[in-house]
Image (cartoon, grey):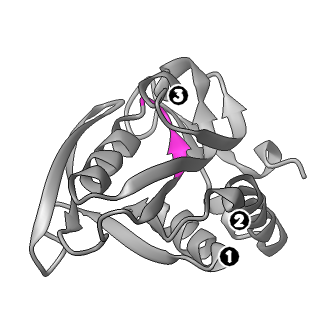
Amino acid sequence: MDLKGKIRVIEDFPQKGISFKDITTLIKDGEAFKFVIKSLADLVKDKNADIVVGPEARGFIIGAPLAYELGAGFVPTRKNGKLPAKTLNAEYKLEYGTDIIQMHEDAIKPGQRVIVADDLLATGGTALSNIDLVERVGGKVVAVAVVIELTELGGRNVLQNYDVFSLVKYLS
C-alpha cells in the first residue's frame, strides 16, 4: 500500500521551516489505518510485549490499536498536569522547543516488556523521554515502533540501543 500517498505534508507548520507530516489523512482511511496497525504489529510481534506506551496525542492513535492487535496493555504518557495519580516526569526536546511528558508511577511493573509507539520519529526526543520513564520504573523497552521516520533528523541514532521499526521514511 502507498502510505506516503495517504500522508498530507504541510509546509511551514507549526512554524516556518518545518515540513509537518499529517497522519489524519491516513487514519481516516479505514483500510490504510488497518494496514498500518497490522504492519507495525507484524514487525514487533516477536518482541512479546506486555505493554505498549504511546505519547500524547498521536501516540494514542497508533499505540492503543497496536496494543489491542498484540494482545498487550496500553499506557498513555501525557503532557504535564494531565494525569490524576502520582507521576514521573521527563523533559524532552522537539524540533522546535522543549516539553514535559508524564507517566503514572504504577503504570508499568518491573520486568514488563514495553514497546514505545508513536506516529513519527524525528530527533528521537519524545521516544527517548518515554524510554526514560519506562526504565525508571523497571520496565524493559523491547522496541520503538512508528509510522513515519524523518531519517535526516537522526532519531534512529539517538535510539541506537533499541530496535526501531518504521513503515515510511522521509528525508525531513
Q: What residue would you read off at disc 1?
A: 69
Which residues make up the magenta segment?
Answer: 118-123
In this rendering, position of residue 75 left or right of residue 144 = left
Q: Which residue is mark 3?
A: 156
User: Residue 113: image x %, image y %?
Assistant: 46, 61
Magenta span main SS: strand
Label 3 SS: helix
Q: Earlier in the sequence, mark 2 or mark 3?
A: 2
Instruction: Using the image as rendered, state which of residue 5 and residue 134 is in the foreground.
Output: 134
Q: Which label belongs to residue 150? A: none
Q: Residue at x 40, y 27 (%)?
A: 16
Distance in Å between CA atoms under marks 1 and 3: 25 Å
Q: Residue at x 61, y 64 (%)?
A: 48
Is label 2 in contact with label 1 (beta carbons under 8 Å)?
yes
Q: Are marks 2 and 3 in contact (CB under 8 Å)?
A: no
Q: Quadrant of the C terminus?
A: top right
The x and y percentages for residue 92 are: 24, 39
Real-space Cα separation, disc 2 to disc 3, in angstroms: 21 Å
Q: Which mark is residue 37?
A: 2
Among the two numbered marks 1 and 3 on one chain, the one whose residue lies closer to the N terminus: 1
Earlier in the chain: of badge 2 and badge 1, it is 2
**Amino acid at pointer 3:** Arg
Give x and y (percent) for residue 171. Answer: 64, 22
Residue type, mark 2 in image: Ile
Up the image or down, 19 lies above or below 100; here it is above
